[in-house]
Image (cartoon, rainbow, N blue to C red):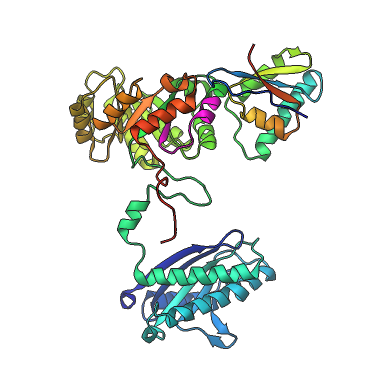
Amino acid sequence: MSTDVYEQQDTVFHKKLKLQMKDKGDEGRIAFLEDYLDYLLRGKKLVPPDFPTFAREIMGLDERKGWMHIVIWHKDSELVEFARARGYEYKIDHYD
Amino acid sequence: MTSQGFSIGEALVGEAPEIAHIDLIVGSKNGPAGQAFATSLAQPRMGHTPIMAVIRPNLPVKPATLIVPKVTLRDLEAAERIFGPAQSAVAKAVADAVDEGIIPKEQAEELAVIVSVFIHPRGKDFQRIYRYNYAATKLALKRAMAGFPDINVVLEEKPKAAHAMIGFRINNLEEPPYLGVELVHDDWRRIEGILRDLPRRDGIVIKAGAPLIKKYGIEVCQKIHEMRPESVVIADMKSLDTGNLEARMAGDSTADVVAFSALAPLKTQERFIKECRTIGVLAYMDTINVADPLEIIGRLEVKPDIVELRGKPTADMISKVKEACGKRALVALAAEIDTVGAKEAVKSGAAIIMVGETITESAEINRTASSYLEELGIYEVDQFRVMTDF
């Protein structure tokens, strides 16, 4: 089960969403992006304006001990809502 | 009243999915209401067959009442709901309206009533359908006979009204002052964090800054509205040419207010403002790098709805701008001023205090924005009243 290790801190500081892909490699990342789009479209949500950038970011991110580190600015960002809704292992932490 | 034409009543009662929405007209059989009654009865349309309201079989109510289904009846189940509990409720409500003096008894023969009835296809509970439609019909009749609403009530309520189904109100900036928060970042996830941190108050106006729009396109306004449907969104297009096209693009992307540059050629500015009027958004003049905004405004054939001034304009300057633009025009002040300065600016006549990094770079965005709202006395339009029926 996923856990939030987020603690209330000043909102000016960004956070990192540590997230595990369900499958390994590029295929796992593509499946993740497909799943995110599926979540948005089925939920009748608009695709975030930075989606092209986000897709490039996901495909290029290093994997750190099985976790992808994604920069977010709010503990309830749309990405976190998605991770919760679709059962991804995740945790939220402050940036290094 | 009814001898000269007809009266109109409307009422919404109950809870989904059985919620009752009644629109009706009451008028003389010898006037347009009577004519519509006869025409409708004689020319039924598929799925919208009108029926007479009856107290029981073979006993039609008086005044004669015709029920017209709003939703197309596609099967017997839908027909049962409207011709059963709904029509019975309407008939009882009309009869009770006579009994209670809402409709004068002596006019029962002279009048005709046409009742448009809405029943949601998912509404199944006959008890609720009956009770809601009874209450809604009687309320609509009472309103029709009383000429409700008074036009002053309409004008008073229009900036406060939120439709139950859309969940937000169209805000035309009619209740200043407002706190404007300018988003100048070019990182969507940063913007998302700011939007989520800001207090959920419709007294906050969001300005999508030019860098944000240039990076992601004008449709970013729609995403902002998705996250904050209660907020007015200003698209800072800073249009310098193709004014009408850019105004339309922003309007299509749900921006409520669209900004153009006062440096643009006058014809461009006028086309921009006219296009804003056409599509129902407010035209916002950005006076950055303009030495004398009043001179530009004076030369425009059509005036902007909002003028953004920079620096520390005097009360006299603000007053002159409003005078030049018309009594409904607003002045926005773009300056990184503190809460005390903001309060002084409002006293000088500014309607929107536009603040950027003072809020968005603050360690505690919510608290900082709240302190401005508090200092400016900005409250929710419904904060101090309990919304009840009329």
Question: Can see residue B47?
Answer: no
Q: Is residue B193 magenta?
A: yes
Q: Give above or below for B162 relative to A76.
A: below
Q: Position of residue B89 (x, y in %)?
A: 55, 75
Q: Give above or below for B40 relative to A84.
A: below
Q: Give above or below for B286 relative to B119.
A: above
Q: Position of residue B193 (x, y in %)?
A: 55, 25
- Of B196 and A57, the residue lying toward us: B196
- The image quadrant where one finds the N terminus of chain B is bottom left
Q: Position of residue B231 (x, y in %)?
A: 45, 37
- The image quadrant where one finds the C terminus of chain B is bottom left
Horizontal placement of B127 versus B341: left or right? Answer: right
Which residue corresponds to the image point at 48% horizontal and 24% vertical from the top-left?
A: B365
Horizontal placement of A65 versus B132: left or right? Answer: right
Total marks placed: 0
Q: Is residue B305 magenta?
A: no
- Res B17 quadrant in image: bottom right
- Of B225 and B153, the residue lying toward us: B153
Horizontal placement of B179 versus A57: left or right? Answer: left
- Of B360 and B387, the residue lying toward us: B387
Tell which residue pokes out farthest to the bottom in this image. Answer: B58
- Res B369 quadrant in image: top left
Q: Position of residue B182 (x, y in %)?
A: 42, 25
Which residue corresponds to the image point at 44% horizontal and 57% vertical from the top-left?
A: B388
For the record, the magenta segment spans B192-206
